[in-house]
Image: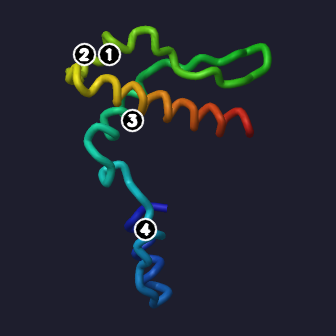
Amino acid sequence: MTKQQYFEMCEMMGSDPIEDEIPVELDDLPAEVQLAVQIYGILPDIWDTMVGRYAGKKMHNIKDIFDMWEVDAADRKIMYTILLLLDNLRMQDLNTK
């Protein structure tokens, strides 16, 4: 559900939006997280085709991608950590389905 849909639902039900229930959208996140999500989307997936499990993203060329996207050297460590967190969450979600 998007923010707009949530606000429309509240309006139809005659209730006030509750801050903790308002959906978070990509634009609400810090710029570093938005960039990490964009970079995560372009990294190729690794699948174990024998058992049909998601094995993560190919990160072997991450330095080249950071260079191409002009990620500051000081931000690369936190950016890589965000990418690993995103991949871990996705791996858990896909492999439990």
5 on left or right of 97: left
Quarter of the image where one finds residue 79:
top left
In whole angstroms, how far apart are the C-alphas of marks 2 and 1? 5 Å
Secondary-structure class at tag 3: helix
Mark closer to the chain start, 2 or 4: 4
Q: Are marks 3 and 4 in contact (CB under 8 Å)?
A: no
- 18 lies above or below 15: above
Q: Is residue 16 left or right of residue 87?
A: left
Residue drawn at point x = 45 percent, y = 9 percent: 60
Looking at marks 3 and 4 on the same chain, the residue that comes earlier in the sequence is marked by 4
Give the camera-side residue of 92 and 53. 92
* Residues at marks 4 and 1, CA–CA distance in whole angstroms: 33 Å
Total label count?
A: 4
Q: Amino acid at mark 2?
A: Met
- Decide: marks 3, 1 in contact (CB < 8 A)? no
Q: Answer yes or no: do the residues labelled 2 and 4 have beta carbons within 8 Å?
A: no
Q: Which badge, 4 or 1, is on the more N-terminal residue?
A: 4
Label 4 belongs to which residue? 22
CB atoms at circles 2 and 1 under 8 Å apart?
yes
Which label belongs to residue 65? 1
Task: Look at the numbered discs 2 and 3 and tell me whether their residues touch, using CB distance below 8 Å.
Answer: no
Residue 69 picture location, percent across and down: 24, 22
Q: Considering only order in the chain, which callout, 3 or 2, is on the residue closer to the N terminus?
A: 3
Classify 36 as above or below 67.
Answer: below
Q: Amino acid at mark 4?
A: Ile
- Which label's residue is closer to the chain start, 3 or 1? 3
Q: Position of residue 26 (x, y in %)?
A: 36, 49
* Quadrant the C terminus occupies: top right
Residue highlighted by disc 2:
68
Q: Residue 9 in the image: state x and y as whole percent.
A: 47, 77
Residue 37's mark? 3
- What separation in Å lies between label 3 and label 1 (alpha carbons)? 13 Å
